[in-house]
Every structure is written in structure tokens, then in C-alpha cells.
Image (cartoon, grey):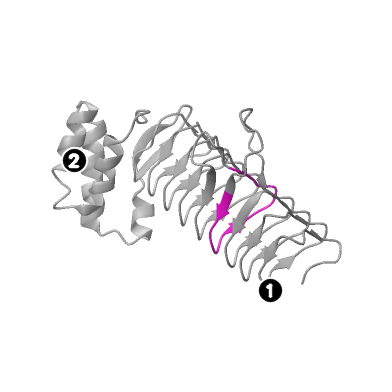
Amino acid sequence: MRHPTAIIHPGARLADDVQVGPYSIIGEHVEIGAGTVIGPHVVIHGHTTIGQHNQIFQFCSLGEVPQDKKYKGEPTRLVIGDHNVIRESCTFNLGTVQDRGETTVGSHNWIMAYVHIAHDCVVGNHTIFANQSTLAGHVIIDDYVILGGFTGVHQFCRVGESVITGIAAVVRQNVPPYLTVSGTPAAPHGINSEGLKRRGFSPEAILAVKRAYKTLYRQGLSLEQARTAISAEVAAHPELAIFAAALAESERGIVR
């Protein structure tokens, strides 16, 4: 069903079964896949591609121009995957030519009300963003991350796989995978054991992650020393590979 009050540009490409609610506006360069439901009062602009079986609630603004003074109207993109739930009043912006030119949101994400995803961000799969969590530009959020309500992530930061943040955490540096962080600025408080259990990590794998955490944060080693020690455990515990890689690639430094 497409409500008669919805305004859909003739150039927009919508699958036949896409539903569009009252007073929603779909722009010329928008493409929306099968099974997606657009609620009332939603505005989707820009070169925006939305996949299949997404549910987008009222008052969302998707594909609007970046909140970046350098943006000069270039045809940058927003790409959203499949099976996402995007709740009320979320704002996802286009990318910028100064970076990758695309803001990307993966699949199977649960994104609650008032979430902002700024230009050039990359959001993985199976994430949960609680109410009013906010990403500045150029942020990377890896798979299975849970952002607590009111979490803010500084531009150019990366939050690693299966991280969980406490309410109102302020992330100003990279967060290695598997951690629990909270506070202003965000600091590590152990690993996300419950999240790893829910993903099916074995007790042995979780123990290996705990040991890696202690190597990094409790033994007084430099970042390079800790990375070397953790890398030596990857052959026996492959789940530590992304942990070691995150330490090697952390140009912003990591939470401490």
C-alpha cells in the first residue's frame, strides 16, 4: 500500500510491494528493495539505496546532505542493507567526497529512536543502537556492537566487534573488539562475556579473550608489546586475530 498523500518522485525505483505511509516523501534517486515498509512522515532523499525487508518508522530522515561545510552538492550516497529496523526520528546522512563518498549501514541491525549516523560512517551487521546514540563522521562500527543509550562516538573512531557501551558513554578513541566500555571518556571495564556467550563462543574462547584483555590492560605492557603477545596466541585461538589486528591498526589510540 502506498498512501495517496505520499509524494514519490517518478524517478524513484521502488519494488512493487514496498509500502509507503501517509505524508512520506521519496526522492528521485532513491531505490528501495522488496518487502520494505516506510512509515508516515518519513523523508528519503539523495542517492539512497535501501535493501529488502527493512522497517522504517515515522519521522526518519534518510539520505539528507551531510552536516559538513565542505559538502558542495556532490552525488554521494547512503546505502542500507536488508532486514533492518529503524525506529522513530533517526537521521542518516550521505557521504562526502573527502572520504569514501558513501555512508553504509549493513543488515539485521536494530536501531532505536533518535539515532544519528553521520557522513561516511560504516555500520556493520547485527548491531543494536539504543535511543539517541550518535556517530560523528567517518566512524566505523563493527558487527554485533551494542551502543547504550546516549552513547556518542567521536569522528574517525572505530568500535570493534561485539563491544558493548554503557549509557552515555563518550568514545574518543578506538575500542578493541569484545570489550565493555563506559564513562566520559569511555574506559574499559572487562570483556563483553554475555555477548560472546550469545554468539556461541565456547568457554575456552571466552577465557582466551579474557587473557588477552589482561595482557593489554593489566600487565603494564606497551601497546606494541601487548599486540605481539596477543598475536602469539592467534594460532591456538583464532578469535584473537581481530583483537590483535585492531591493536595494529589503531592510529587514534585505544581506550584506556
Label 1, secondary structure: give it. Answer: loop
Q: What stretch is highlighted in magenta?
A: 78-94
Q: Name the residue under label 2.
A: 230
Whether 61 is among the magenta residues is: no
Q: Position of residue 82 (x, y in %)?
A: 54, 63
Q: Nearer the viewer, residue 134 or 61?
A: 61
Which quadrant does the C terminus fall into? top left
Q: Which residue is drawn at 63% across and 51% down?
A: 47
> The residue under label 1 is which amino acid type?
Asp
> The residue under label 2 is which amino acid type?
Ile
Q: Is residue 222 above or below residue 100?
A: above
Which quadrant does the N terminus fall into? bottom right
Neighbours of disc 2 within 10 Å: few (<14), some (14-19), many (20+):
many
Q: In this view, does 151 lie above or below 5?
A: above
User: Quadrant of the rendered structure where residue 83 is?
Assistant: bottom right
Q: Where is residue 169 in the image (x, y as percent from the top left)?
A: 50, 34
Q: Where is residue 37 in the image (x, y as percent from the top left)?
A: 68, 65
User: Quadrant of the rendered structure where residue 231 is?
Assistant: top left
Mark 2 → mark 1, Cα distance in angstroms: 50 Å
On the rendered structure, is 65 left or right of 96?
Answer: right
Q: Which residue is drawn at 49% across and 55% down?
A: 106
For residue 17, which numbered disc appears in the image? Answer: 1
On the rendered structure, is 99 left or right of 16?
Answer: left
Q: Earlier in the sequence, mark 2 or mark 1?
A: 1
